[in-house]
Image (spheres, rainbow, N blue to C red):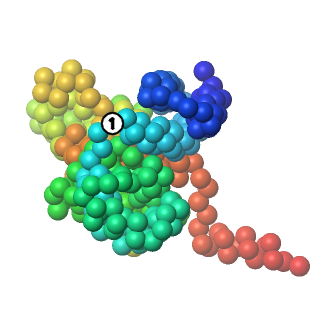
């Protein structure tokens, strides 16, 4: 199945539906098609992750935004047929704007094509009109979230620690989009094998620790492997390529790892992400695991991973290299 072709067909179907009278069942059918195609996309992406076809992995990453846009449009249409909590939606928008001082409600109103003060009027009216579909979709896009999150989450109830991590993740996402972050990929295969303790690079890798069985058996470390700091007693596997970057303005690094636990007696079988910070002394500091975060923060971390994939496929040129290239191009 060609994902790009099917996406184009779905977009055409949605445009046609806006030109005729349709029912809830029609939109649910479209929603099921989007969901089915997304499952196929994830299946293909998983296949590529388990192969050496890295170009295909990077191509698949570009489709994520297309799926997000389609989901938002279809979910917004389905809202017409569901019980809608206007107050919760508006509170979520306010909570996100509070944490994003660079975004103003007037910007969302302008982009959505509504008059200034639109949201304030909605908030003051306990009863009456709900926000327009265009306003909700625009708010979701500008605030970097989904329509589902705006409607069903309780973003304002996040803990102070979760909000701090969310601010941190959002800032990294912004810097990645602006090309201030240089994400580097480490192949997942490198984490699925046991490395020699004396190996120059892997012996000092911040995500690897001495194999505990070696210490029990020989009294000293011989090999290195990955252990989760969040679930030290579980058998956690690295389930995809790992990405890291140096944090802008420092020598500290951030790592994001896709992980998997299979048939664990406590965790069962789940896929998730773990984030670690690496300080200047090359010591790792566990930041968070998406198995322990709320759904909203989990989605933001998933989006960060997708941005890291996309960024790592881009060519990064240092300022020194740019200077040399510019000097040559300007030569008469």
Q: Is residue 40 above or below residue 180?
A: above
Left or right of residue 322: residue 306: left
Left or right of residue 103: residue 274: left
Is residue 10 visible to us here?
yes
Percent across and percent down for residue 38 are 48, 29
Where, by quadrant of the figure, is residue 319 drawn?
A: bottom right
Looking at the image, which residue is at 12% across and 27% down? 266
Looking at the image, which residue is at 39% across and 46% down? 147
Most foreground residue, 231 or 94: 94
Q: Which residue is mark 1?
A: 82
Classify 10 Å Cα crowding around label 1: few (below 14), some (14-19), many (20 and above): few
Most foreground residue, 266 or 92: 92
Element assignment for label 1: loop
Percent across and percent down for residue 329 are 80, 72
Look at the image and tell me in which quarter the N terminus lies.
Answer: top right
Where, by quadrant of the figure, is residue 80 drawn?
A: top left
**Number of dots carrying numbers:** 1
Looking at the image, which residue is at 45% across and 56% down? 135
Look at the image and tell me in which quarter the C terminus lies.
Answer: bottom right
Most foreground residue, 214 or 263: 263
Most foreground residue, 100 or 71: 71
Percent across and percent down for residue 175 are 46, 64
Is residue 11 visible to us here?
no
Q: Residue furthest front?
A: 128
Percent across and percent down for residue 77 are 45, 39
Looking at the image, which residue is at 34% across and 66% down? 121
């Amino acid at each position: 199945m060609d994902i790009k072709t099917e996406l184009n067909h779905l977009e055409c179907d949605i445009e046609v539906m806006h030109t005729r009278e349709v029912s809830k069942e029609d939109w649910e059918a479209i929603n099921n098609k989007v969901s089915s195609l997304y499952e196929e996309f994830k299946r293909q992406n998983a296949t590529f992750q388990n192969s050496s076809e890295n170009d295909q992995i990077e191509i698949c990453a570009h489709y994520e935004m297309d799926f997000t846009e389609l989901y938002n449009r279809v979910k917004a249409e389905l809202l017409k047929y569901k019980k809608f909590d206007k107050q919760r939606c508006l509170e979520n928008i306010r909570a996100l704007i509070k944490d994003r001082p660079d975004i103003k409600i007037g910007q969302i109103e302008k982009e959505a094509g509504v008059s200034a003060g639109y949201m304030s009027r909605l908030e003051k009216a306990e009863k009456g009109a709900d926000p327009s579909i265009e306003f909700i979709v625009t708010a979701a896009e500008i605030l970097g979230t989904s329509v589902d999150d705006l409607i069903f989450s309780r973003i304002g109830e996040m803990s102070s620690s979760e909000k701090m991590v969310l601010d941190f993740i959002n800032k990294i996402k912004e810097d990645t989009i602006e090309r201030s972050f240089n994400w580097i990929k480490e192949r997942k295969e490198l984490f699925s094998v046991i490395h020699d303790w004396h190996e120059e690079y892997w012996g000092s890798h911040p995500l690897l620790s001495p194999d505990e069985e070696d210490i029990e058996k020989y009294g000293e470390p011989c090999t290195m492997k990955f252990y989760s700091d969040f679930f030290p007693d579980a058998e956690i596997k690295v389930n995809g390529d790992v990405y890291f970057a140096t944090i802008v303005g420092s020598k500290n690094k951030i790592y994001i790892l896709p992980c998997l636990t299979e048939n664990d007696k406590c965790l069962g079988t789940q896929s998730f992400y773990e984030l670690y910070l690496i300080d200047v002394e090359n010591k790792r500091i566990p930041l968070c695991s998406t198995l322990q975060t709320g759904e909203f923060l989990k989605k933001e971390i998933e989006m960060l991973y997708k941005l890291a994939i996309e960024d790592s496929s881009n060519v990064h040129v240092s300022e020194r290299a740019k200077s040399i290239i510019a000097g040559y191009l300007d030569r008469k």
